[in-house]
Every structure is written in C-alpha cells, then in structure tokens.
Image (tube, rainbow, N blue to C red):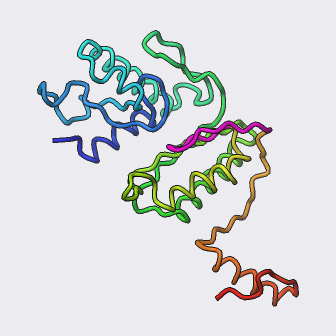
Amino acid sequence: MAFSEKVKLEAKKKACFRCVICQKPFVEIHHIIPQADGGSDTIDNAAPLCASCHDLFGGNPEKRKQIREMRDHWFDMMEKRLNGEVNVLDPITENPLNINMLKEKGIAIYHLVYEHEDFEATATILMKLLQKVQKDSPNQKRYLYIDIEGHKNNSGGYDHDMFELQKDFALGFLLQFFTRIHTPLISVENNKLQRNDVPEEFEIYSNEKELMNKLKKESREKHFEVYPPEVE
C-alpha cells in the first residue's frame, strides 16, 4: 500500500510544503523505511523530499537515520514558526544536518493547486494572497511557490489551465509583484525592483469572448470604442 492522501497532506503541512533536507518546494512523500523492508504507511515513516534529494538519499539504506533526523528537526522548526516561537522572517538557525539554509528575509507565499481548481479559481486565490501579504507586510520581499496536484494531460504535461497559469499568469503578470516565483515548470527571478502597487481590484475572465463582450457593453455605456466591435 501507499501513503493515504490524508497522511501525505499531514506530512506536507508539517514540513510547510518543503523538502526536509534542502528546504526546496515541490515535494513527494518518501518512505524512510521502504515498504519492502517492513516500513509502514504512517506519518512516522513519512519524509517530504524534493525529487533531487529523493534521488540522492532515498535509495541509500545508510541514510535512513539521517533522513529521519533531518525530518524531525525540520518538523520541529516549522512547528515553532507556526506557534510564533521564532520570527517567521528570520533565516532558519544553522543546523549541521541541513544542506541549505534560508538566507534571505521575506514573505513566502505557498499555494497548492488541487485537482478541482481551474485557472480562474487559482488565479483569484493567488491575487487575494498577494493583496493580503502586501497589506499585512507592506513592501517586504515576496516569494511565490506554486505546487500543482493532477492537471496532467495524456502526454504527461500540464493541462491548458495550469500551463496558462504558470506561463502567462505567473510569469507574464504576477512576477512584477514578486522577487521570485517558483512553479513546477519555471523558477524565475524578477530582474527589476519588485512592484508594491498591488491592484486593489482585479477581475479574471475565463475567455476573450467574455472580456470583449464586457468591454463592448461598457463602451456603449461610457461612449468609447472597443476593437473588435463584435464577438460572436
């Protein structure tokens, strides 16, 4: 058997959706002790790892104790952060078990896109998160991490909604309001100063026809022209 969805989500939440070794996002849940060796499908045997750390550590029996120690340390650190025992903006205290440390202060926004969420729903959530962070922590550096469950097409790539979300919405629009954005397809640094004039109002249209018809209606009310004049 594999981990249940409940156990996988619990492990990801305890790790704040990061790899317990290198702290990178986009993790899968690894059996510390493999099932073939009697490992259980419980949270005690679960370690969130990124693909790279899974390849480096996951198949090595000599690393099992180290993975568990790293996991326990990271779980403990994230619990302290959530409980306010350490400043969420401070870099994580150095620990010899960890390979990489968080070196920069800033606000990390993480969103997991579930299978039932489409482009419009996800984009709306991301904008609300951006607006809230700018309001609560104005002008802090912002880092966006988007993870995606499902949404795969027959060839193994992402479906149209999630491809558009990553390429056009995240890269083409959101990046200007962040210092860095990470998605399963792209990891991009903003090479300009992060903008902090986050729009207070934001509307998302599911297709061009819907948008153009709205603009056409407004043009009649406000007496301005819209091209093209007709959208069938």
Tell me where residue 9 sits by quadrant. top left
Residue closest to the far front: 155
Q: Residue at x 76, y 82 (%)?
A: 228
Q: Quadrant of the C terminus?
A: bottom right
Numbered label tally: 0
Say which of 156 and 51 sits in front: 156
> Does 105 appear above or below 69?
below
Say which of 112 and 133 sits in front: 112
Q: Is residue 222 magenta?
A: no
What is the span of residues highlighted in magenta in the rendered image?
Answer: 180-192
Q: Is residue 185 magenta?
A: yes
Residue 221 in the image: state x and y as whole percent: 82, 89
For this view, does 50 lie left or right of residue 60? right
Residue 29 in the image: state x and y as whole percent: 32, 35
For this view, does 120 lie left or right of residue 4? right
Q: Residue at x 38, y 38 (%)?
A: 12
Tell me where residue 39 sits by quadrant. top left
